[in-house]
Image (cartoon, coloured by chain):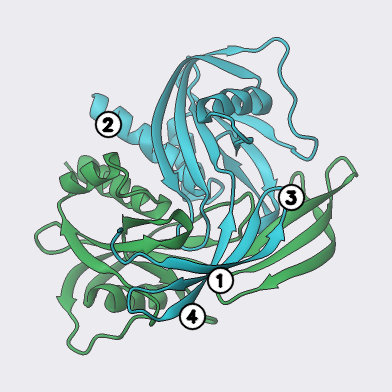
Chain colours: A green, B cyan
Amino acid sequence: MPKFEEKTIATKKIFQGHIINVQVDDVVLPNGKVGKRELVKHPGAVAIIAITSDDKIVLVEQFRKPLERTIIEIPAGKMEAGELPLHTAKRELEEETGYGAEHWEHVQTFSTSPGFADEIIHIYVAQNLYEVSNRAVMDEDEFVELIEVSLQDAQQLMTNEQIYDAKTVFAIQWCLLHKLTKK
Amino acid sequence: MPKFEEKTIATKKIFQGHIINVQVDDVVLPNGKVGKRELVKHPGAVAIIAITSDDKIVLVEQFRKPLERTIIEIPAGKMEAGELPLHTAKRELEEETGYGAEHWEHVQTFSTSPGFADEIIHIYVAQNLYEVSNRAVMDEDEFVELIEVSLQDAQQLMTNEQIYDAKTVFAIQWCLLHKLTKK
């Protein structure tokens, strides 16, 4: 039994959406008392650190309704039912940027908000990029603009908080570490 | 007007919880069509990279219901209404670890899940730690165990996916970068 496990004794479904489901679980806490946990269910996502032949990072600028602002992120997207993360990564990179990649490598998987959501995100690095001739199309409610920047410029975007989300901050740090430890 | 802005024309409240609220907004998309956005509202959080005098990182192990597993994280917590992030950080460090700190510095703020949630997390580094004599108590539904590890051991925990969440992965990378660039 995992340490401090909270055993579910009841589940109340609150909302079934297209992106998320919401439920409230009654759980038995480690001290024997009963508590409530508000849970957001998400299918999981992937994100791609795509590096061009001239060492630029491929980014997309998009409006994020929850934040009510436009931010700059690495390409990313939700996994579809039954889809393997690497397949999602290849599909999303093509849809959002028009790039394919010859070299793919898994970098890290992490939970974004372990306090209330089960979303995990798989991060890949994609290298040896090429332009896809008949690119797949994005979801009809997605609007993004492609940007390619140097690592130095990406750091500046992070300082300015135009890069402002967990996966992209991770990506910039990963690129910096990779460069520093390669020397 | 922000690029690709999505103007809200209706908001449907779905759920009012203790931690999160959920709503669905109808928005006018940049192409003039109407779309739906499922939004999780969260009060925001802080997390603390606390470094001991012998260069260990202070971590807490806890069961995370959304993931149905125990993970190892940097100390963190939700902001209360009207609370300043630095105040939350000081309170949470004391509650979860019994430590106070003489030196505090803001490191980074980022959104955890910009696709569906407005949660942002403010990361601080805390140094010159001391033990608080009459420590504040945790919420009654919180159960955590304190661990102090070297940076090398923290990296191993990240490789093993025992460290598995965005803020803690950020923290380990930040410590590594800080060390590499200080040399």
| Disc 3 and disc 2 in contact, CB within 8 angstroms | no
x and y percent of residue A22 in the render? 68, 66
Tell me whether marks 2 and 4 sit on the same chain. Answer: no
Tell me how far mark 2 sits from mark 4, CA to CA. 38 Å
Tell me whether marks 1 and 2 sit on the same chain. Answer: no
Which chain does the numbered disc 2 sit on?
B
| In this view, the mark in front (2 or 4) | 4
Question: Mark 2 sits on what residue?
Answer: B180
Q: Is residue A78 left or right of residue B71?
A: left
Question: Mark 3 sits on what residue?
Answer: A2
Crowd tier of the residue under label 3, counting other residues whose Cα lies within 10 Å: few below 14, some 14–19, many 20 or above = few
Q: Quadrant of the C terminus of chain A?
A: top left
Give the answer, above or below, for where B137 lies relative to A42.
above
Mark closer to the chain start, 3 or 1: 3
Q: Amino acid at mark 2?
A: Leu
Residue at 40%, 81% in the rendered image: B33
- Secondary structure, mark 4, is loop
x and y percent of residue A122 in the render? 44, 63
Tell me whether marks 4 and 3 sit on the same chain. Answer: yes
Residue at 51%, 62% in the rendered image: B116
Which chain does the numbered disc 4 sit on?
A
x and y percent of residue B47 in the render? 52, 35
Q: Amino acid at mark 3?
A: Pro
Question: Mark 4 sits on what residue?
Answer: A83
Q: Amino acid at mark 4?
A: Glu
Tell me how far mark 1 sits from mark 2, CA to CA. 36 Å
Question: Mark 1 sits on what residue?
Answer: A43
